[in-house]
Image (cartoon, helix red, strand yellow):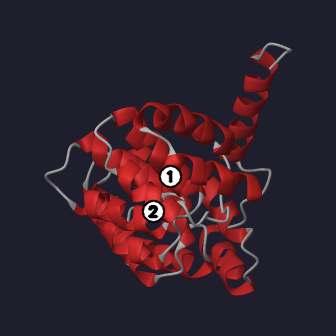
Amino acid sequence: DAGRRQVAQRLAEADAGDVERFLALFELGLRGMRGLEQPEAWADVGPQLYDAEDEGVRQAARAVGASFADQELFRRMRVVLADETAAQEARRQALTILERDPAAKNLPLFLELLDHEALRPQVLPLLSRYDDARVAAALLERLPDWPDQTARGAMEVLTSRVEWAVELLDAIAAGRLDKSRLSAYDARQMASLGSEPLTERLSREWGRFGQSSEQIKQEIAKTVAVYQSAPLWA
């Protein structure tokens, strides 16, 4: 923390010629790190760098700010993400930054992006972090119209929580979702959630999904084949 405070202070005091170099080194040193204490100087210099004319400086500054979970940065990224007139790449970058922000205020934006085909694959995995009934409702409403690959991501989310898994089974039982959407993998995922009522319902309505399942055997065979075909160094 002390070292990061010094670097942030140097950045705040540096002339224009040194800022880009210092910032690039700072970003490299923090790459992959999260939840760091935000230096006091960054609160002053960060917002200036977020608005820099140079694209490289802006991106490096935003990466540094994300490492500090800078709330001002997250606020700006929500504005970009909500702007339907913004360039798709700008919205994608904003979404990448917000992947580091678990705040509940992001959820309405993420749910709206389920209707944005290009950003949907990036949004779907983020929904698992929110214990909110709106997630299951939004997914089950759209899932019947999605292609298999997209539906696969939605099923991963729906089978990650007991409450959502129950709603998924209810939708299938009511005919709102085709039974074929539920694979043996999904059933096993739900069974692994540790809810006895859910596991009993799965056994009662769908039978047991054990190692004897032909679909599971095929998945195992595929995985084994991938490992066997990989070079030894991998």
Q: Nearer the viewer, residue 55 or 153?
A: 55
Image side of residue 162 versus residue 209, left or right: left
Q: CA distance from mark 2 to mark 1?
A: 8 Å
Q: Position of residue 154 (x, y in %)?
A: 46, 58
Name the residue that disc number 2 marks.
Answer: 44
Q: Quadrant of residue 68?
A: bottom right
The residue at the point 73 percent across, 24 percent down is 226
Q: In the image, residue 39 lies at what x, y percent?
A: 61, 63
- The quarter of the displayed image where residue 178 is located: bottom left
Q: Is residue 19 left or right of residue 217?
A: left
Mark 2 is surrounded, within 10 Å at the Cα level, by few (under 14), some (14 to 19) or many (20 or more) other residues, namely: few
Q: Identify which residue is drawn at 34% across, 35% down.
A: 55
**Mark 2 touches mark 1? (CB < 8 Å):** yes
On the image, the x and y values in percent for residue 186 come to: 60, 59
Give the quadrant of the N terminus: bottom right
Q: Which residue is mark 1?
A: 12
Quadrant of the snapshot with the C terminus: top right
Q: Dot 1 surroundings within 10 Å: few (below 14), some, or many (20 or more)?
A: some
Q: Is 117 drawn above or below residue 171 in the view shown? A: above
Residue type (three-letter) at the residue carrying disc 1? Ala
Q: Amino acid at mark 2?
A: Asp
Is 129 positioned to the left or the right of 44 in the image? right
